Image (tube, rainbow, N blue to C red):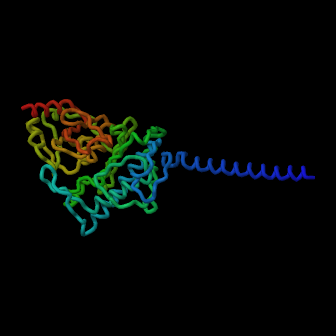
Amino acid sequence: MCANVVKLNLGRITFLITSTLLCLLLYSVLLSSDSSKVNHRGVFNVNPNKKSTGENLEKTTTEVSLKHLLAVSIEIAERGGAEVKNVRKLTDLKESSKGKTKEGANDPLTEGDMRSHRAMVYGLKKTYPYIKVISEEHDSSDINFDEVKTVVGENLEIEKVLNDADEMVPSDQITVWVDPLDATQEYTENLLQYVTTMVCVAVKGIPMIGVIHKPFENFTAWGWVGHGASPQLQVAKTFPEKWKTNPVIIVSRSHAGKVAAIATNAFVNATITPAGGAGFKSLEVVQGISSAYIHVTIIKKWDICAGNAILKTLGGQMTTLNGNLISYEASDDVINKGGLLATMFEHSLFLEKLKSVQRR
């Protein structure tokens, strides 16, 4: 009888140990699947700290779908544009100044800049907490991700143009550049045709995805290098012969510096078109309205990255005035100091003409 009791107790102990081990194993599997699977956002391990900018999260390398990131970029550019439009309806833009530019022009900041910044950057960080994001504006307040509207990241136009095309890229190779409101000066002057919101995705410093949204025209242009561009974007097909001697050169309206004088020295019969916003000027070149976009003073990379990516997608070029490619690595200086030349055609012709002026 004692032997039977011992056997019974041993059986119960074995059952309890086995049950406990099975429960622990099941719990471990559930935790693992929750933290490592790819979710609908196209990224692994999306568990944002609800009260963090994302910068203090444990560094993790994840795989990101560039196709999904393109859709997200379009959505947040348009979300920022909606904020820009809403603020412009207000009597008070809460305008302040960040100081003077190198050329002595005022560098304004408005409530539109900040609301767009929050909508765009917070949306990005909620979706991709491990991706490096660089924005023109800064906000030191904590982010409560429960209060940030979820980015859907679905776009029928992209699906139609790209079909099943996609690329998976490690998150530590990606830097996203955000300009929440390009052409702020013109925004304060109600010259709204120049205003854009922009997102650019650089991979290993190379601009690969560009989104330029014109909120007051409800128009969004996008391009993904090697894959395609927005079908509604009119693209220049040819370079008029007369432009080789009589080009139409678009330059900065508020940061002109010496650009107009240099352009007319390079091309005596050039037509100079002043305009606001680097995004606007890049699209004028893409659409064949202007022969080239020239900038001879410093310019911030969030101003030019999206235009660079779209030009690159469509066969155009954007370089410094010496012909060097511009790097958009997060570790690089945010200022491009080598000037700027953007063209769809005859890039080498413009470079040589500009270099000849600089050699004089």
Residue 181 place in picture, x, y as percent:
28, 55
Which quadrant would residue 187 be assigned to in this image? bottom left
> Can the viewer see residue 232?
no
Residue farthest to the right, as pictured: 1
Of 2 and 10, the residue lying toward us: 2
Q: How many marks?
A: 0
Q: Which residue is drawn at 36% across and 54% down?
A: 121
Residue 78 place in picture, x, y as percent:
36, 54
Residue 119 located left or right of residue 279: right
Of 117 and 295, the residue lying toward us: 117
Residue farthest to the front, as pictured: 2
Q: Which residue is drawn at 26% across and 45% down?
A: 334
Residue farthest to the bottom, as pictured: 91
Query: In what quadrant of the picture does the C terminus appear?
Result: top left
> Can the viewer see residue 303?
yes
Which quadrant would residue 312 be assigned to in this image? top left
Query: Is residue 315 positioned above or below 41 on the image?
Result: above
Which quadrant would residue 186 be assigned to in this image? bottom left
Residue 113 located left or right of residue 107: right
Residue 14 place in picture, x, y as percent:
78, 49
Residue 199 place in picture, x, y as percent:
34, 48
Of 182 and 103, the residue lying toward us: 103
Query: Is residue 298 positioned above or below 97 on the image?
Result: above
Query: Is residue 315 positioned above or below 213 on the image?
Result: above
Q: Residue at x 22, y 63 (%)?
A: 95
Of 14 and 337, the residue lying toward us: 14
Query: Is residue 91 positioned above or below 116 on the image?
Result: below
